[in-house]
Image (cartoon, rainbow, N blue to C red):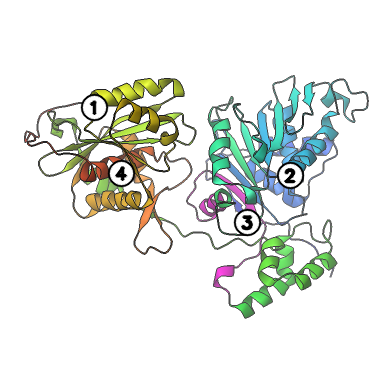
Amino acid sequence: MSFAGNQSARYQISPKCKNVNLVHAEACIELAAAYGLVLDEWQANAVRIWFRMTEEGRWAASTWGLSVARQNGKNGALEAVELYLMVVLGFKILHTSHLLTSARKAFKRLMSFFGRKVNDPNAPFPELNAMVVEIRKTNGQEAIELSNGGLIEVGARTGGAGRGSSFDFLIVDEAQEYEEDEQEALEATVSASPSGDPVIVYMGTPPKTDGERGAPFIRVRSAAVTGRSARSAWVEHSPQGELDKMSEIELQAFVRDRKNWADANPAGGARIAESTIEGECERMSARSFARERLNMFPSPAAQLELAFSEKVLKRQALSAEQVDSEVAPIAFGLDMNPEKTRISICAALPTADVMHLELAANTDFDSGGISAVVEWFWTRCKRRIPVVLDAYSPARDLLEAPLKKRGLMVRVLDANEFTQGCGQLYHAFHREHSVTWFEEQDAFYESMKSTVKDPIKNRPGSFKWNRADLEVDLMPTMAATCALFGATKFARRPRATSTDSKSKRHAVVL
């Protein structure tokens, strides 16, 4: 029997939605075929997993992923998707690669549909060329713009692709090389998506090492396959098995099993010859072959433990009538999202026997509002009430220096202090029952109940906060952590506090 790749993926994960339709998926496959790009069965299946629409006409998933071993043809599926998004839906796409050479190859493949210039007499498809408004070939800033509003910009992430612009789709090709700082910069390009329904697409293979490079890809993949993310559409071709749990003898047998070759290489027997895989298996170490040819990732992180259950949160909640109206804050916690478009501020207010945590703000922000935020803090804090933030908070970039210049007491928590703060907030809710919160603040509740404990390597029992899925707004939890720690370590307690717990007060609002 001849060698043939398995067309069914190990993981074909998509969100659970009622009455999902595949109209755009089938139309995408048909459009690609009409222009000479006939998808393999496995490529078409990936398009069907991705292109699922809800009853409301929105994408069922906000994160799409495809992982398959090199040279199988994953970019064929992506080209079909990009063609349809531009020509039929008129969406704006930012296609990024790790290497400039990879970005150029992607751009040349797209020009094979649209031609090399406006009114190109040699364009293979005149009707597509007729839609072209502009083709830019500037090194590192290649782009094709269409008359229906469709646009694709193609570039290397190292060249600052897409900075300062807004797109509907962000394509992260070569995602195994994607780094944290690149993610922070690029995700902002779709936060104000023109369509209001942004999607980020990850394409790649397992990273070579466990480190910052490739960490976002590992995290997205782990969230999808463990079920932590409810809005991921993930397709992965790999054999069944977990490398981390295999002995050396088991690993050697695993990489020589030709069924595993077929499971990981859907284009096996077509684009990739069996003899090619045989040669790679002989030359590579078992672990390198498992990663490079069998597309094997590290074992996905187990379901992380929710830090605060709904029962625990509701037990510590106070109504407006129960919140003391006479108490002033003794510390503020501050956080900001990576795009620096939203800000969260939490106040810590001491009562007779507990610390009350209350959101003063969880709202939109732009750099033009820096002076207003500084003056807001100055009015309430002067030089004696600490403003506390995590050392890795994006708020540091915009607000730390202006706050200090104004004379405020700014305290930045290092990694050890923040870890202590996470433990302090967790135990305050679970064991000590020493904190309360204002039950009318839904943003605080939604953030806290979707916060998970992320264990810290080589520090048993220690953890930091993470989000249950990519949609969670973690800022209120981060701000509350900083406020409580600041109230304990940096604040000066007032000599007396009110004991009238029945007085009504309203939230401290920015």
Q: Is residue 466 above or below residue 19?
A: below
Task: Pick whichever of labels 2 and 4 is earlier in the sequence.
Answer: 2
Which residue does the numbered mark 4 point to in the structure image? 481
Q: Is residue 255 above or below residue 475?
A: below
Q: Position of residue 400 (x, y in %)?
A: 38, 33
Which residue does the numbered mark 2 point to in the structure image? 77
Horizontal relation, residue 472 to residue 176: left or right: left
Q: Residue flagged by tag 1: what amino acid is it?
A: Lys
Q: Nearer the viewer, mark 3 or mark 1?
A: 1
Q: Residue flagged by tag 2: what amino acid is it?
A: Ala
Which residue does the numbered mark 1 point to in the structure image? 382
Q: Position of residue 334 (x, y in %)?
A: 34, 35
Give the alpha-carbon distance from disc 2 to disc 4, as whole Å: 44 Å
Q: Secondary structure at mark 2?
A: helix
Q: Is residue 55 above or below residue 302?
A: above
Give the alpha-carbon distance from disc 2 to disc 3, as whole Å: 21 Å
The answer to whether the residue labelled 4 contacts the one labelled 3, judged by CB atoms less than 8 Å apart, is no
Task: Pick whichever of labels 3 and 1 is earlier in the sequence.
Answer: 3
Task: Pick whichever of labels 2 and 1 is earlier in the sequence.
Answer: 2
